[in-house]
């Protein structure tokens, strides 16, 4: 907890933007998953009436599925970029050590 507080105190705008860039896809997956669950519950249990307009239900369901797909793609791309950057640094380190 202490490290988190120290990070918050010294963080710059770029740090916050990178944090948001990593956090927002996960939030999108959670919220979209909730919408999908509401859609499914509404189809099974009509009296709960989470969503009343049939057109709105279908559009919301499609939006939720698309948001999940795009968020997973974004997370995958970020992880791939981090992995590639790590491999580049490792190759540079190995080539620098072998020259010595």
Image (spheres, rainbow, N blue to C red):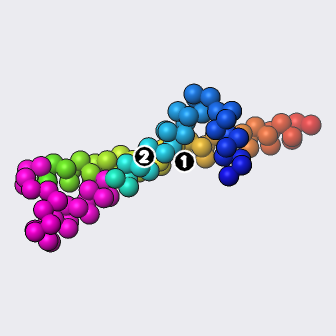
Whole-percent x and y of residue 91?
Answer: 73, 42
Q: Quadrant of residue 47?
A: bottom left
Residue bounds of the magenta highlight: 32-56
Whole-percent x and y of residue 100?
Answer: 92, 37
Q: Is residue 69 visible?
A: no
Q: Is residue 70 magenta?
A: no
Describe residue 100's horizontal placement relative to residue 30 as left or right.
right
- Separation (CA) of disc 1 from disc 2: 12 Å
| For marks 1 and 2 on the same chain, the one whose residue lies earlier in the sequence | 2
Q: Quadrant of residue 6?
A: top right
Question: What's the residue at 20%, 67% (across, down)?
Answer: 41
Foreground of the two, 70 or 8: 8
Dot 2, crowdedness within 10 Å: few (<14), some or many (≥20)?
Answer: many
Magenta stretch, main secondary structure class: helix
Check the image and name the residue furthest to the bottom.
44
Describe residue 26's horizontal placement relative to residue 65 as left or right.
right
The kind of secondary structure element at disc 2 is: helix
Describe residue 95's horizontal placement relative to residue 17 as left or right.
right
The residue that label 2 is drawn on is 25
Check the image and name the residue furthest to the top.
13
The kind of secondary structure element at disc 1 is: helix
Foreground of the two, 68 or 16: 16
Whole-percent x and y of residue 65?
Answer: 27, 53
Foreground of the two, 53 or 6: 6
Which mark's residue is nearer the viewer, 1 or 2? Answer: 2
Residue 24 is labelled as none
Whole-percent x and y of residue 69?
Answer: 34, 50
Q: Is residue 3 visible?
A: yes
Question: What's the residue at 38%, 53% (across, down)?
Answer: 29
The residue that label 1 is drawn on is 79
Question: What's the residue at 17%, 59% (across, down)?
Answer: 50
Question: What's the residue at 15%, 72% (across, down)?
Answer: 44
């Amino acid at each position: 907890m202490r490290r988190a507080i120290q990070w918050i105190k010294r963080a710059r705008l770029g740090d916050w933007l990178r944090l948001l860039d990593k956090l927002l896809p996960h939030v999108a997956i959670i919220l979209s998953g909730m919408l999908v669950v509401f859609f499914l519950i509404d189809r099974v249990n009509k009296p709960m009436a989470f969503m009343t307009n049939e057109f709105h239900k279908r559009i919301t369901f499609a939006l939720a599925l698309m948001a999940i797909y795009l968020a997973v793609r974004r997370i995958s791309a970020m992880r791939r970029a981090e992995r590639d950057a790590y491999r580049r640094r490792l190759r540079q380190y190995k080539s620098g050590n072998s020259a010595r």
